[in-house]
Amino acid sequence: MSTVPMKQLQIFYPADEIMPDTAQHSLPVRPHPLPVQMVSDLVTHALAEDWGRLGDITSAAVIDDTAQAHAIIRAREDGVLAGLAFAQTAFEKSDTALQIKTHLTDGHALLAGTEVMTITGPAKPILAAERVALNFLGHMSGIASQTAELCAMVAHTPARICDTRKTTPGLRSVEKYAVRAGGGVNHRFGLDDAILIKDNHIAVAGGVTTAIARAQAHVGHMMRIEVEVDTLDQLNEALAAGAEILLLDNMNPDQLRDAVTRIDGRAISEASGRVNASTVVAIAEAGVDYISVGRITHSAPCLDLGLDIDFA
């Protein structure tokens, strides 16, 4: 067992692992590490929210100031770990006297009963930070676990699972980090990351070709342009206009196979819409390069982890 220093957790994504070139293509997004200051600020806000004006009045009432404890955080179900830096920071901010050891790193597979972290020291600050630490771990590990499940289901294909902007407001960096921990890859982080012409852009601009031409004139040759299409006619028009990434929206597997054949390596293909555990294999086997999945961030259930005081 070894402690993982915070400085090793401040940047989770190695640059050479961001949207790697599989075959000829990679999506045009930059890496999004989690700076230590971001972790600190989010945890500070979460603790302030939980402690309120008076702090943990229950522990103040029933636990002596001198009481010491040894606490263990364990997984209560199988999954994939993410969020250690947040849990560690919560305990550090609760009391710098606490001794914290992390036994794994983000991205590790968990079995029910696996020890994740131990905390030793004054009992009151351990209990005061418990819920915030577990909330971050549970939320992020839930995202990582659901991502890992989908990644495993399509591992026999070249398709990669990626996220979307359907994230909890204010927590996008956190949730996209968790996707990476689960083996997924990040789509664009925000509106400033990449050109993605969606249906409403096309409607307002007056058509696929017009929208692409305007985008090309605006960003120049250094920025790739992705276009959402929901019909094969739109796909043909987008390809003819020079789209480099095609978001194939709500197409069934037969339509996706036809789309991939038409693209014929000239652009990146990304399937999106109605993706879940029941459909993802057929979508991947249609031959697309990427599958974007909103549910891995907006609907992932928390992974069950718990903190127990060890009296042994």
Image (cartoon, rainbow, N blue to C red):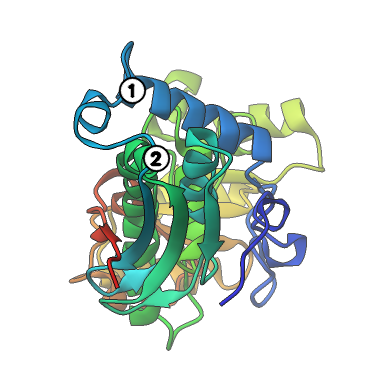
Does residue 240 appear left or right of residue 14 in this picture? left
Asked if 283 appears above or below 203 in the picture, the reply is below
What is the three-letter code of the residue carrying label 1? Trp
At 58% from the left and 62% from the top, the residue drawn is 268
Asked if 65 appears above or below 88 in the picture, the reply is above
- Which sits earlier in the primary sequence, circle 1 or circle 2? 1
Q: Nearer the viewer, residue 183 or 59?
A: 59
Q: Image quadrant of residue 219?
A: top right
The secondary element bearing badge 2 is classed as loop
Q: Which residue is mark 2?
A: 66
At 41% from the left and 77% from the top, the residue drawn is 109
CA neighbours of label 2 inside 10 A, class few (<14), some (14 to 19), many (20+):
few
**Residue 203 in sight here:** no
What is the three-letter code of the residue carrying label 2? Thr
Q: Image quadrant of residue 221?
A: top right
- Residue 277 percent coordinates (x, y): 22, 69
At 66% from the left and 58% from the top, the residue drawn is 13
Q: Nearer the viewer, residue 79 or 152?
A: 79
Q: Which residue is mark 1?
A: 51
**Residue 90 in sight here:** yes
Q: Quadrant of the C terminus?
A: bottom left
- Residue 67 percent coordinates (x, y): 35, 45
